[in-house]
Image (cartoon, rainbow, N blue to C red):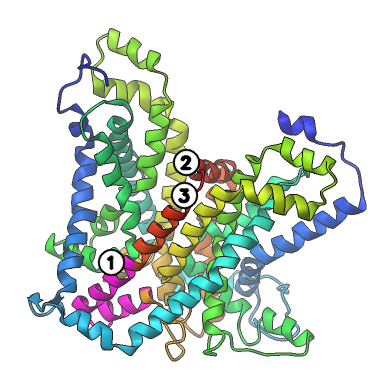
Amino acid sequence: MRGRVVGQHWYTPYAFMLPGLLFYAAMFAWPAVIAIQLAFSDYDIVHPVRFSGLDNFIQLGHDPRVWIALRNSLLFVLMFLPLTVVAPLFLAMLVNLRLRAIQAFRMLYYLPVVTSMVAVAVAWRYVFNREGVVNWLLGLFGTGPIDFLLDRHWALPTVVLLEAWKNAGLFMMIYLAGLQAVPSDQVEAATIDGANAWQRLLHVVVPSLRPTFAVTLVLSMLEAMRAFESVYVLTRGGPLDSTLTLGYYIWSKAFEDYDMGYASAVGLLLWAIMIVLAGFNLLVTRRRDV
Amino acid sequence: MARRLYRRRPRISARRVGLYVLLIAVAALFIGPFLILLSSATKPASQDVFGFPPDLIPRPPVATWFREAWTTIPYARFLVNSVIYVGITVPVYLVISALTAYPLARIAFRGRGVFFMLFLSIMFLPGELMLIPRFLVMSQLGLTDTFASVILPAVLSSLGIFLLRQAFSQIPDEIVEAARMDGANEFAIFWRICLPIVAPTLAVLAILGFVSVWNSFIWPLVVLTSQSKFPIALGIAYLSGVAGTDVRGLAAGTVISLVPVIIVFLLLQKRILNSMGGAVKG
């Protein structure tokens, strides 16, 4: 490290970081402390906060809706992963072709990423309506119509599909960056050795994309675990709790029932799951040569 | 350059045509819902919005529903609010991120790594989980239902600090040393020399900031009670509640909310798309 530099004092770095540190304290650290405190308290906005020990966590253990929410969140992850970790790789390979106007296609596929979840959900209501385009297509194959958002078997997969559709462009661009870093001499060597497109994908491209898979896997899991806006705007957790995710349950306990303490306890549970998932992913990727 | 070397002379082949058909089919998957929305918003009253087979071409296209959405809902107000939110949040976000990232990249001091980890930890405090405690912080500060309450949580992000730290640390030492020889103090070096050099990164962050503030919905829903302060995305949710049965008005309102963000995206798409790969690789 360098010695003291002209024009720098001991406090110079802290002076630069001061506004950032203030915002960090007010908008992240302090709320995090409050979240933990609330999880061990009773609070309904009207009455003052009252310490209640482990009551919320005991309640959590006996609350069947938490288990429904947890199961739905895990189902969400399971359905979401193939749609965001695998499918966008094929999209990326498609837009990695050297073709005229390929940039325009990248742009079109990315469009849902920059639009608001509210607008996207409204658009989807027109598509997945009972008399909408999807049901017309199903009709051509002799099935349907299905009330996608009103049927308790279809509502969750439909919300997952919306989330995956909205985020596909983002994952595609992450893979595209990864693909463009794949050494082209290796691909050429494999071609000369007589590997077909599928073999090249499996034995050359996929192994060298390992760090990219690690990134998309973490992003995808965390995104799915906290899924909430899409549930809010499409189904409000219904029908019959079939789309009740942990994120939505926390919101509805806090801002519909004003049971802030209990909602915070469920929040800590979600937090713990997310940290475990992220930590697990870090461990897995650390072991490899990243 | 490399691309041009590899690109083959354009010629029509079955493979090429097939690839374009595939590309267009996939494109329909991603922009189809938006087109259906647009078609619902411009169909005359005499034409059904739904039905088999789908009748997607408006005959003739009308602007009635846009006018209706505009008059029944205070749309202009929502749009102005969103412009205010973006206009204040994004510049403050850029300045604070840059100030914070600068010493993390260019000043040697004790605990630098700890501070960097501290700011990166924001990544593990997702907004959805902060709704309740932040709501309470805002009421403790007496700020609920104010413009400030929407802006304050959005001015610090780990991505901003992370990308700017990368950009600052790539500035060659010689440039900074030359300024030091001339007696410039650290802030002058930051403001007049380093900040202009990282302008491309600032531009990317400004775009991402615009998109995220424009689309923000859940936090304003929690912290705002007066409709007169709603941003546009919350306005749409409000419209879908008020005019739940008016499918055309809702479609028109939603199209209105999409226009600014799509224009920005079309104008700056190269920057946005390139930033994604960089952000993840970096």
Label annotation for residue B131: 1
The answer to whether residue B65 of the structure is visible from this angle is no
For the residues carrying marks 2 and 3, which lies nearer the camera in this image? 3
Is residue B187 placed above or below A260 in the rendered structure?
Answer: above
A11 to the left or right of B108:
left
Please state which amino acid type lies under the numbered disc 1.
Leu
User: Where residue A18 appears, x then y in whole percent?
Assistant: 19, 38
How many marks do you count on the picture? 3
Q: Quadrant of residue B107?
A: top left
Q: Secondary structure at mark 1?
A: helix
- Identified at 28% across, 30% down, the residue is B103
- Identified at 91% across, 43% down, the residue is B11
Residue count near mark 3 (Cα–Cα under 10 Å), binned few <14, some 14–19, many ≥20: few
Is residue A124 placed above or below A3 in the rendered structure?
Answer: below
Q: Tell me the chain of label 2.
A: B
User: Where residue B22 appears, x then y in whole percent?
Assistant: 78, 60
Pointer 3 residue: A287
Nearer to us in this view, B129 or B76: B129
Please state which amino acid type lies under the numbered disc 3.
Arg
Marks 2 and 1 sit apart, C-alpha to C-alpha, by 27 Å
